[in-house]
Image: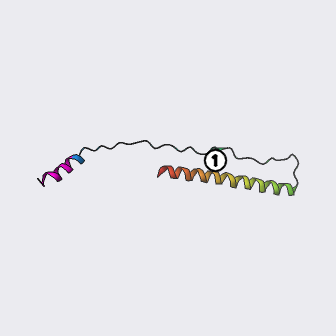
Amino acid sequence: MLLLFPLMLLVSCGNTRTEYVPAPVVPIPPQLTADCPQPVIPDELTYGDVILLLADAMKSIADCNHDKRSIREIDAERMK
């Protein structure tokens, strides 16, 4: 009688099946995929204005790089 109990446990576990459930896709936030703003270039520039324009352009590039880094982090989380 004691030998039948472990045998029943083995038989009952032999009938399991694996069912795969698709994981929901997390959408990328729209502010990360939006176009990067470009600084307005005036018609007449002085040397001082060029420096300010360059500073604005560098800030815009840094912001865009931050957005792209966030997108890469989201994709890395999806791959896990």
Quadrant for residue 20, please give it. Answer: top left
Quadrant for residue 21, please give it. Answer: top left
Along the line of sight, the residue nearer the viewer: 3 or 21: 3
Residue shown at 72% from the left, 52% from the top: 60
| Residue 6 x, y percent position in the rendering | 17, 53
In the figure, 21 relative to 10: above or below?
above
Residue range in magenta is: 1-11
Q: How many marks?
A: 1
Residue shown at 12% from the left, 54% from the top: 3
| Magenta stretch, overall SS | helix
Residue shown at 22% from the left, 46% from the top: 12
In the figure, 32 relative to 51: above or below?
above
| Residue 19 x, y percent position in the rendering | 35, 42
Secondary structure beneath disc 1?
helix
Q: Going by the image, does 12 lie left or right of 25?
A: left
Q: Residue furthest front?
A: 1
Q: Circle 1: is it few (<14), some (14-19), or many (20+) Cα within 10 Å?
A: some
Residue shown at 75% from the left, 47% from the top: 38
Question: Disc 1 marks which amino acid?
Answer: Leu
| Residue 63 x, y percent position in the rendering | 69, 53
Along the line of sight, the residue nearer the viewer: 7 or 26: 7
Task: Tell me the residue that label 1 is attached to.
Answer: 32
46 in magenta: no
Scheme of colours in the image: rainbow
